[in-house]
Image (tube, rainbow, N blue to C red):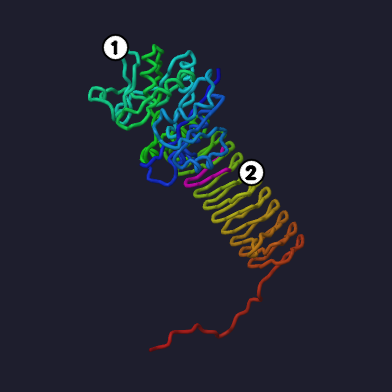
Amino acid sequence: MSLSIIILAAGQGTRMRSVLPKVLHPLGGMPLLQHVIRTAHKLNPGLVTVVYGHGGEHVKEALAHEPVEWVLQERQLGTGHAVDQAMSSVKDEDTVLVLYGDVPLIQADTLAQLVEKAGTGHLAVLTAKLCNPQGYGRMLRNEQGQLVGIVEQKDANESQLVIDEINSGFLAAPAVQLRSWLQRLDNTNAQGEYYLTDVLAMAAGEGVVVESTCATHEYEILGVNDRVQLAQLERIWQQQQAEVLMRSGVTLLDPARLDVRGEVDAGQDCLIDVNVVLGGKVTLGKNVCIGPGCVIKNSTIGDDVEIFAHCVIEDGVIGNACRIGPFARIRPETKLEEQVHVGNFVEIKKSTVAKGSKINHLSYIGDTRMGSGVNVGAGTITCNYDGANKHLTEIGNNVFIGSDTQLVAPVKVGDGATIGAGATITRDVPDNELTLSRCKQQTIAGWKRPVKSKP
C-alpha cells in the first residue's frame, strides 16, 4: 500500500484582492503552496498531485521545480469535484490524503497520524476545537460520540452552529472507497457545490468506521482567505523559526523582531539583534554577532564574525573573524577571507578580498581581486565599468592605497605598492614603489574672493 496526496489549490482567492493567485502569496519568504508541498513530501508519498485552477499557469511556472503532478480543475465546482479530478492517477490500493494549498502550517506528524488511521480501511478526518468556530463546518456526532457527518456553516441550523468541534477539511481514506463516494456526491446545498465533507455521511451510512484526530495546535488548520489572516500566520511562522534558533543556541535580543524568510543554519552562541531579516539559505558559524537592522540573504558567514548595524549581505561568503559595517553592502559573488575589515558605507561587488585586508570608509570595490594585508583609504573606488563592459582590478599583497583614489580598470597594482591620496591610476603600478597622480599645489598671492555688487 502506498500513499497518494492530493493538494487542492484551485481557489480564486478573491478576498486577497490581488492579481497574484492566493497560493503564491509568500509566508516566511516561500509561497503558501510550497509549504504544503514540502510538508507532503515528508510523508514519503508515492504520488503528490496539485489540483490547480485560478491563475494556474502562474502557479505551475512558479513551482515548476517541485516534484508534483498537476491537474487542472477548469470549473470550480467544490472540493469534492476537485479531488475527483485527481483520482485518475491514484491506484485503488493506495491511501489518499487530501491537503489544502492555502493551509500552510499543518504539521507532518499530525498528518502521519491521520494516514495511519486510514490505513486500516477507515475514513480518517482531522478536527479541531475552536473558541470561535465561525466559518467552519461543524462535526456531527451521534449519542455514542461517533462521527456521522459534517454540516457546512452556510447549511447549519441554530443548534448545529453552537458546536465547537470543526472540520479542518483534511482527510485520509482508502482510494477505492473514496473513489466510490466521490462519484455519488451531489450539489443540493446552499452553494450548489460538491462538498468533499459529504463523504463522511456516506461512510457512516455504509458502516465504515470514521476515525478522527484532533489537531495538536490550532494554527495547523488555519487557512488564508485574506491578507489579515496571512499576516497572522506570518507571525506564527516567525515565532516558530525564532524558537528553533534559540533552542539551537542562538540568542535573539527580541524574538518578535526577527524575520526568517528561508532556511537558517546557525552555530552555537550567535547573537542576533532586532529587526534582522534572514532570507534564502543562510549559514551562520559559531559566535556570530549581527547588529540591528541587517539583511542577509543566501550567504555563508564564518565563525566569530561581527556584523554591525544596518548592513546588507547578499550571495556572499564571509570568512572567520571578519568585521563588517555599519552601513556596509556586500553584493553577490563576493568572498571575504578571514580577518577582513569592511567599514561604514563600503560597497563590494563580485570581488575576493584576502586575509587581513581593510576597506574601512566610503569606498566601492567591484570586479576586484585583492590580496592580503591591503589598506584601502577612504573614498577609494574601482572604476570597473566603461559604459559597455566590466573590467578587472587586481591588487597585490600589502598594498597601501591613499584616500580618494580611483583605480581605472583593467589595472594591476603590484605587491607592496603605495598609492598617494587623490591619485587616478590608469596604468599598472609596480611592486614596492610609490605612485602619485596629482597636480602640483600652488598658492596665488593676493587673490581675493569676489563679492556681490551693490544694487
Give the Cα distance between marks 2 and 1. Answer: 67 Å
Residue 264 drawn at (x, y percent): 54, 36
What amino acid is at disc 2? Gly
Nearest the viewer among 391 and 167 is 167
Q: Is residue 47 left or right of residue 200?
A: right
Position of residue 8 relative to residue 394, above or below, is: above
Task: Indicate which label's residue lies in the foreground, 2 or 1.
Answer: 1
Image quarter hosting the C terminus:
bottom left
Residue at disc 2, secondary structure: loop
The magenta stretch spans which residues? 287-298
Question: Which dot marks residue 164?
Answer: none
Name which of mark 2 and mark 1 comes first in the sequence: 1
Secondary structure type for disc 1: loop
Q: Is residue 181 shown in magenta? A: no
Please provide percent x and percent y for residue 381.
62, 61
Farthest bottom residue?
455
Residue 304: image quadrant is top right
Name the outermost residue toward the left: 158
Mark 2 nearby-residue class (10 Å; few <14, some 14–19, many ≥20):
many
Image x and y of residue 112, in percent: 49, 21
Specify few, some or many for label 1: CA neighbours under 10 Å numbering under 14, 14-19, or 20 or more. few
Nearer to the camera, 196 or 241? 196
Cβ atoms at labels 2 and 1 below 8 Å apart: no
- The residue that disc 2 covers is 319
| Residue 430 image offset from top left, x and y in percent | 76, 62
Left or right? Give the position of 343 relative to 419: left
Name the residue tied to disc 1: 143
Residue at figure coordinates x 50%, y 33% from the top left: 50
- Which residue is the extreme one toward the right? 431
